[in-house]
Image (cartoon, helix red, strand yellow):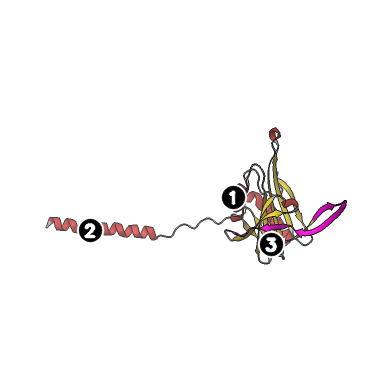
Amino acid sequence: MRYVVLVAILAVAASGCGGEERQTASAPRETAAVASCPKAWKAGWQRLANDVGSLVYCPTWMPPEVDAKIDGRFRNGRWVDDDKSYLVSFLWLDQDAGVSREVHVNFRGYPGRTTIPTCESTHSVEGKTIRKPIPCFSDPQPKKRRLGDVTATVYTANQGIDEWHVLYAWKRNGSLYTVSEHVVSPYAYSQVIQNLDRMTRGLVALEPNA
């Protein structure tokens, strides 16, 4: 009789523990923190959004050699055209011991348009200068990159300040956006792709507040 009672008590205890485990397992998980534009960089990107009167993308990660502070030590330029298209460029250059290394990242936006901009090709034929309009971004790769909320087309033949860069381009709300990085030491092509994936995945949209 005592044996039967002891078995019953153990069964109840086991049942109680199992119930507690199920409760714990079904408890709501903590919500992951929402990414935001880093405080040290946000003011410059917010001013850009205000100046162009449209959404811009602030990065939350950059290759370790640079940061994305628009008025900081790695700024290479900030340009806004009359049509409100913009270019923001960051550059790190090292020529120690005669070895040149560079990290160059560009961000572009074309508010209110999704067409690829046109650049000018200039070359000489029999002493004559030939100028021909060509797409600024070309050689699109067939496989798109799906990174967070962005689905980007990869362009590997680009012009102007994006020459020798791999460039990701995507559209949002009737506007075209791009980020590109130069393929040069210390990063090989595959590493530049990894950098661009991480930068693009971490982008945060900023709306104008003025």
Stretch of the chain drawn in magenta? 121-146
Residue at numbered disc 2: 11
Camera-nearest label, 2 or 1: 1
Alpha carbon of mark 2 to alpha carbon of mark 3: how far?
65 Å
Along the viewing direction, whichever of 187 and 59 lies nearer the viewer:
187
| Residue kind at label 2, given as amino acid type | Ala
Screen quadrant of the C terminus: bottom right
Classified by dominant secondary structure, the portion drawn in magenta counts as strand
> Where residue 145 is drawn, which disc sits there?
none
| Residue kind at label 1, given as amino acid type | Gln
| Residue situated furthest front in the rendering | 126
Camera-nearest label, 2 or 3: 3
How far across and how far down the image is residue 190, in percent?
60, 48
Disc 2, SS: helix
Residue at x-position 66% and y-position 63%: 171
Along the viewing direction, whichever of 189 and 150 lies nearer the viewer:
189
Along the viewing direction, whichever of 203 and 101 lies nearer the viewer:
101
Q: How crowded is mark 3: few (under 14 residues within 10 Å), some or many (20 or more)?
A: many
Alpha carbon of mark 2 to alpha carbon of mark 1: how far?
55 Å
- Horizontal side of 34 relative to 117 (left or right) equals left
| Residue kind at label 3, given as amino acid type | Leu
